[in-house]
Every structure is written in structure tokens, then in C-alpha cells.
Image (cartoon, rainbow, N blue to C red):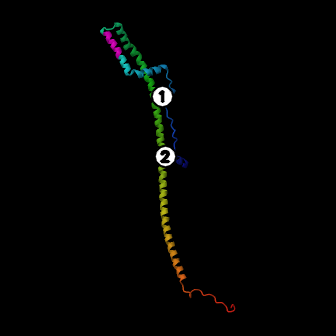
């Protein structure tokens, strides 16, 4: 339990923990597109363009000229067949295939985004646990430092009292020594007299 708590407190994730994934490459790996699918995607993406719109306008103008008699009736029949039969019947399923292929790619993108979001959420939870554990540890250290500061202040006060007492004792001893030095010679212990025999 203590080791687990230490791991949470001192947790440092590797910067390359999550591999950046490319949806395009994963789409190619998961679903190899055939020529028909590639062609359908190409048509689906290019039909909705201004170039295709201009081409249809040009085709409609040819049909109008055929109806007005400027062109032969065969051209009018060909334009009618091309616009109402061929383009509608052929282009519709092609666009549907292209949309299905594109939707598969979008599903893969959504799946990658979902997995990345889950990983980010998991990392966010770990970071929150890590920060909470650090906060708890910092509160403990703050309380310990506060107690140590109180103890040091108390010891500092006692040390000051001791030094004051020691200074008073030193001052008292100094006065006593001075008094002893100034005592009369008569009070001091007399020397032992020499015997006459020694002379």
C-alpha cells in the first residue's frame, strides 16, 4: 500500500506514452480499397464541384439548342438519354458506393477519436489522483514543518533563558573573585614560621 502511494506521489508518465495514429493509414490497413471503390470515391468527391455543374449546364444548353431546332433531333434524343437515363441510373449507385466508403473512413476516424478521448480521460484521472496525493503529502509536510518550527521557537526561548542565567552566574562569580582578591592580608592564611633550628 505504501509503495502504491509512493508511486502515485512520484508518478511521472513517459512523454511518448500515446502513439499518434493516422486515420488514413489505419483505414488503408483495415479496409483495402479496390479500384471500383477508389473510382466511386473519386466520382463522389468530384461530382459535387463547380466543374461538374458547368458540364451539366453545357449539356443542358445542347439539349435546349436541339429542342429549338438549331441541332438535329438525334442530338436531342442523345442529350435526353444521357441526362435522364445514363447519368441518373449510373451515377446514383456510384455515389452511394462512394458515400459508403467515405463513411467507413469516418467511422475509423470516430473510433480513433473515441479511443484517444478514453486515453486522455484515463490520464486525466491519473493526474488528478497524482495531484491529490501530492496535496495530501504537502499538507503532511506543512504540518510537520509547523510543529518543528514551534519546537525550535520553544528551544530558542529556553536557550535564551539558559544564556541569561549563565550570564548572571558568570557575573556573580566574577564579583566573588574580585572580592577574594581584595581581602586584607591579615585574613589570608599566614605563612608557617621557620624554626630556629633551621637558622
Q: What kind of secondary structure does the magenta stretch mostly adopt?
A: helix
> For the point 47% across and 56% down, which residue is it?
143
Q: Earlier in the sequence, mark 2 or mark 1?
A: 1
Q: Residues within 10 Å of mark 2 (few under 14, many from 20)?
A: many
Q: Which mark identifies residue 130?
A: 2
The quadrant of the rendering that contains the C terminus is bottom right
Q: Position of residue 112 (x, y in %)?
A: 47, 32
Q: Position of residue 89 (x, y in %)?
A: 40, 15
Query: Looking at the image, which is closer to me, 183 or 158?
Result: 183
In the displayed structure, 20 sits above or below 186; it is above
Give the image quarter of residue 102.
Answer: top left
> For the point 48% across and 51% down, which residue is it?
136
Q: Over which residues does the magenta segment extend?
A: 57-67
User: Which residue matches tag 1?
Assistant: 24
Q: Please tell me whether mark 1 sits on a helix, a strand or a loop.
A: helix
Q: Position of residue 191 (x, y in %)?
A: 62, 87
Q: Residues within 10 Å of mark 1 (few under 14, many from 20)?
A: few
> For the point 47% across and 39% down, which residue is it?
120
Between the C-alphas of marks 2 and 1, the distance is 35 Å
Q: Residue furthest front?
A: 199
Query: Looking at the image, which is closer to me, 95 or 4?
Result: 95
Amino acid at each position: 500500500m505504501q509503495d502504491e502511494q509512493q508511486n502515485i506521489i512520484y508518478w511521472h508518465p513517459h512523454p511518448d506514452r500515446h502513439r499518434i495514429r493516422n486515420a488514413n493509414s489505419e483505414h488503408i490497413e483495415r479496409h483495402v480499397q479496390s479500384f471500383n471503390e477508389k473510382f466511386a470515391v473519386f466520382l463522389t468527391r468530384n461530382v459535387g464541384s463547380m466543374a461538374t455543374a458547368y458540364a451539366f449546364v453545357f449539356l443542358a444548353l445542347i439539349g435546349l439548342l436541339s429542342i429549338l431546332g438549331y441541332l438535329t433531333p438525334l442530338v436531342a434524343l442523345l442529350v435526353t438519354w444521357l441526362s435522364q437515363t445514363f447519368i441518373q441510373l449510373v451515377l446514383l449507385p456510384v455515389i452511394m458506393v462512394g458515400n459508403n466508403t467515405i463513411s467507413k473512413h469516418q467511422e475509423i476516424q470516430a473510433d480513433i477519436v473515441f479511443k484517444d478521448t478514453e486515453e486522455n480521460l484515463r490520464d486525466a484521472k491519473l493526474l488528478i489522483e497524482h495531484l491529490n496525493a501530492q496535496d495530501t503529502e504537502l499538507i503532511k509536510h506543512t504540518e510537520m514543518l509547523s510543529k518543528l518550527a514551534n519546537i525550535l521557537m520553544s528551544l530558542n526561548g529556553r536557550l535564551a533563558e539558559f544564556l541569561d542565567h549563565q550570564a548572571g552566574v558568570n557575573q556573580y562569580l566574577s564579583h566573588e573573585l574580585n572580592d577574594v582578591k581584595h581581602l586584607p592580608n591579615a585574613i589570608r592564611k599566614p605563612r608557617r614560621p621557620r624554626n630556629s633550628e633551621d637558622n
